[in-house]
Amino acid sequence: MQNRPTLGVLLLDTQFPRIPGDVGNPASYPFPVRLLTVPGATVQRAVYEADPTLLDQFIAAARQLEAAGVCAITSSCGFLSPLQESLARAVSVPVFISSLLQVPWVYQLTRKRVGIITASGASLTPAILGPAGITPDIPIAIAGLENSAAFRQPILENSATLDKAAVERDVVSTAQHLLAQHPELGCFVLECHNLAPYGHAVRQATGKPVFDVISFAEWVYLAVEKRLFPDPR
């Protein structure tokens, strides 16, 4: 991967394990990444409080990544969508701060209701959805993981241990339940940027396409590192 462009990732200030597939694990990507933790940007402030004072810290961190030469910038939390416009204006490289930005265009792929699996259903309000372009005319169904102890304790309560098998069971069960409630679902979008490790299991269990931040990152990366096709001559 020498001399390839590097993706920048702005991380919340957490201690839970970032397993393969997690947005904060470099092994999750087929290209180089540069991780940068934003001090004081806790889950409490990002998810539960939607703290607008985080903006200046994230702009400073994004500019630091840009100065380091990254080709694009994402983050470790889908609830940061209210920062998208300001961050995109603050730097000259593409910014895709939230997995939720995918919802409008994946709806166009299927023209069916989009299932959103989120860290906290109660916190996923129009104030978070709107800045991601999710307007009332886009049909969605939301299921949160805040009642899953296996997920809540490491991710929302920031404990130092994580049981991947237990989290996977709860994520799959949540997806299956959402699909049973809304059999018209065309696909799933995983809001939480820590859920990509479980995307394969959700796809296998439901048969629906699953969009997460890692597949989003690969899509954006392919726009900045274009494939060179051989000359036919």
Image: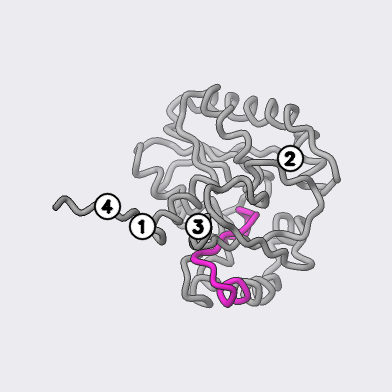
Q: Which residues are magenta?
A: 63-81
Secondary structure under tag 3 reads: helix
Q: Which residue is mark 3?
A: 132
- Asked if labels 2 and 1 touch by Cβ distance under 8 angstroms, the answer is no
Q: Residue at x 61, y 59 (%)?
A: 75
Instruction: Quote the CA–CA distance across marks 3 and 1.
Output: 26 Å
Secondary structure under tag 1 reads: loop
Which of marks 1 and 3 precedes in the sequence?
3
* The quadrant where residue 160 appears: top right
Q: Which residue is mark 4?
A: 229
Q: Which residue is mark 2?
A: 146
Instruction: Quote the CA–CA distance across marks 4 and 2.
Output: 47 Å
Q: Amino acid at mark 2?
A: Glu
Which of marks 2 and 4 precedes in the sequence?
2
* Nearer to us in this view, 137 or 10: 10
Checking the image for residue 100, the label placed there is none
Q: Amino acid at mark 4?
A: Phe
Which of marks 2 and 1 precedes in the sequence?
2
